[in-house]
Amino acid sequence: MIKDLFETLKNGDITLSSAESLTGGLFATTITSHPGASHYFKGSAVTYSNESKQKVLNVPELILKQYGAVSKETARYMAEGAAKLFDSSIAVSFTGNAGPDALEDKPVGLVYIGFAYGETTVLELHLKGTREEIRAKCVVIALKKIEELIKNKKIKY
């Protein structure tokens, strides 16, 4: 299924980028491990700190102070920032808490994945597992959602 997505992206006019926090580059690594990714993958910004979210992706300081890094608001700004930074058709963002401890009083497994594709949507997830399992689940969920968006023709290619 996901292999079909890579073929669709490789053979279409859709470009992809990402803004990663909790995944720390895992999404970009997954994408670039497939031959032909250079046809559609424009890049990724690993913005692990709040400072880098602000400087690289233009996430407003007020958003980070008011809602925190682990929030749907931050995920929205991250996705939109990546779409602008890389001039991509689709941008996905990842922010959340993979553990092992609560962060910003938010539980382990709380994750937000943003998708900028004309309009921006954010998924809120409550995942279980180890830090590595949560991060890996995020990547798979994002890839499936991107495939769904393309199939539903919310993105033209």
Image: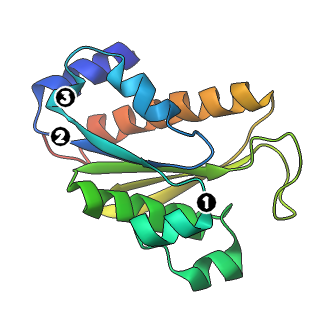
> Is 59 in front, or is 145?
59
- Amino acid type at mark 1: Ser
- The residue under the point 34% across, 42% down is 149
SS type, badge 1? loop
Say which mark, if any, is on residue 38.
3
Say which mark, if any, is on residue 49.
1
For residue 95, side relative to residue 15 (left or right) = right
- Amino acid type at mark 2: Ile
Say which mark, if any, is on residue 14.
2
- Dot 1 or dot 3: first in sequence order is 3
- The residue under the point 83% across, 59% down is 106
- Dot 1 or dot 2: first in sequence order is 2
- Amino acid type at mark 3: Ser
Q: Quadrant of residue 36?
A: top left
Establish if 100 lies above or below 79.
above
Single out the mark in the foreground, 1 or 2.
1
SS type, badge 3? helix
- The residue under the point 54% across, 60% down is 75
Q: From where the camera sits, is residue 112 visible? A: no
**Distance from the alpha carbon under mark 1 to that under mark 2:** 29 Å
Establish if 102 lies above or below 71.
above
Single out the mark in the foreground, 1 or 3.
1
Q: Position of residue 56 (x, y in %)?
A: 41, 65
SS type, badge 2? loop
Q: From where the camera sits, is residue 127 visible? A: yes
Bin the neighbour count of mark 3 within 10 Å (Cα to Cα): few under 14, some 14-19, many 20 and up: few
Q: Position of residue 52 (x, y in %)?
A: 51, 63
Q: Position of residue 122 (x, y in %)?
A: 52, 57
- The residue under the point 81% across, 41% down is 99
- Dot 2 or dot 3: first in sequence order is 2
